Amino acid sequence: MILTDMIAVCVVLLALFGVVYGIRHMGSGFPARSVYCPHQKRRAIISTACHTKGGWGITIERDILQCSLLPGQPVNCDKSCLVQL
């Protein structure tokens, strides 16, 4: 009896972990991505605005909202790092 209870608790915890992971991974918000900036030759963390098209979590990257290489400034470069996404 104790073994089946422990298995049931583990299954519930795994299901809860899966739900939380799915919500955080495919949920709303602006995901942060790490990309290589071809102009400054450095790594940058960018926040992108995603547009979801269709079902099953298919996303198309549309625009860069923030860049760690331009803190507090609007992103006004040619955004060639979007090719990496």
Image (cartoon, helix red, strand yellow):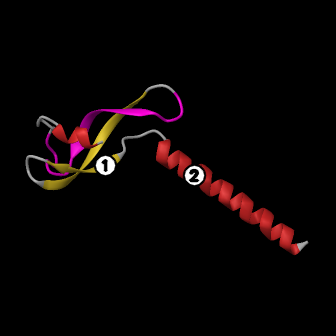
- Identify the element where label 1 is drawn: strand
Residue 79 image-quadrant placement: top left
Disc number placed over residue 33 in the picture, else none: 1
In x, y percent, where is residue 43? Answer: 19, 55
Q: Residue at x 24, y 38 (%)?
A: 83
Q: Are marks 1 and 2 in contact (CB under 8 Å)?
A: no
Q: Magenta segment: does it hold 51?
A: no
Q: Residue at x 26, y 43 (%)?
A: 84
In x, y percent, where is residue 60? Answer: 36, 32
Q: Residue at x 57, y 52 (%)?
A: 20
Task: Name which residue type carries label 2.
Answer: Val
- Identify the element where label 2 is drawn: helix
Name the residue furthest front.
Answer: 84
Name the residue furthest bottom.
Answer: 2
In x, y percent, where is residue 59? Answer: 41, 33
**Disc 1 versus disc 2: distance between alpha carbons?**
20 Å
Q: Which residue is mark 2?
A: 20
The quadrant of the rendering that contains the C terminus is top left
**Residue 14 located left or right of residue 36:** right
User: Vertical placement of 4 versus 22: above or below?
Assistant: below
User: Vertical placement of 9 versus 56: above or below?
Assistant: below
Q: Sequence-wise, which precedes: disc 1 or disc 2?
A: 2
Q: Residue at x 23, y 43 (%)?
A: 66
Q: Which residues are magenta?
A: 55-73
